Amino acid sequence: MTLLTLDELAYRVLPQVAPGRALADREWRTLSQVAETILEDLPFSIDAARVADNVERFLCEGRSQRAWRCRVLLTLLETMPFLTHGRGFSALDLHERRRLFEARIVDGRGLWGLCAKVRYLVLMGAYGDECVPSSLGVLLPGERRPLRRTRRSGSLPIGRGSASGG
């Protein structure tokens, strides 16, 4: 008797993924709707579908052996609202999704708390986009940040708060 690994089990249980994709259609839609739900206060504008595309591109290009975990997370988030709303996440309107995030997911415990990890995917997809303004301090691959002098922690220049300079 051979035991199944978690990734093999996920592969058998989760929906099939089209060639060249990392997420099934339903998972991509859920991710896009999460982005639409939580990215309203960014200091720049980005389309929710673009965020989902960026995450999927990252999973494909990185050939992550753990991409199945992202898929399980998105599937869990899609199904959890059946407990509270009687329908899946993608069937909720924007207002209901925002209320769900505020009431259950942001400070959630147990499986709701696990669902909160989707925020990291969304932020990666948003801030990893090439449209992010450089004024936010986000560097694209190959860009260099100018060197700055930094002060060692604990050392103050003479004359500013030191006992000898006051």
Image (cartoon, rainbow, N blue to C red):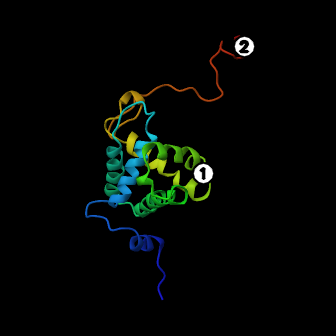
- Dot 2, crowdedness within 10 Å: few (<14), some or many (≥20)? few
Query: Residue 72: image x %, image y %?
Result: 45, 62
Q: Toward the viewer: 119 or 89?
A: 89
Tell me, yes or no, whether the two marked residues, 2 and 1, touch with CB atoms within 8 Å: no
Q: How many labels were placed on the picture?
A: 2
Q: What residue would you read off at disc 1?
A: 108
- For residue 111, above or below residue 121: below
The residue under label 2 is which amino acid type?
Ser
The residue under label 1 is which amino acid type?
Gly
Query: Residue 102: image x %, image y %?
Result: 56, 43
Q: Secondary structure at mark 2?
A: loop
Q: Toward the viewer: 94 or 161?
A: 94
Q: Residue extending furthest front?
A: 86
Residue at 36%, 50% in the rendered image: 55
- For residue 45, above or below residue 85: above
Q: What residue would you read off at disc 2?
A: 164
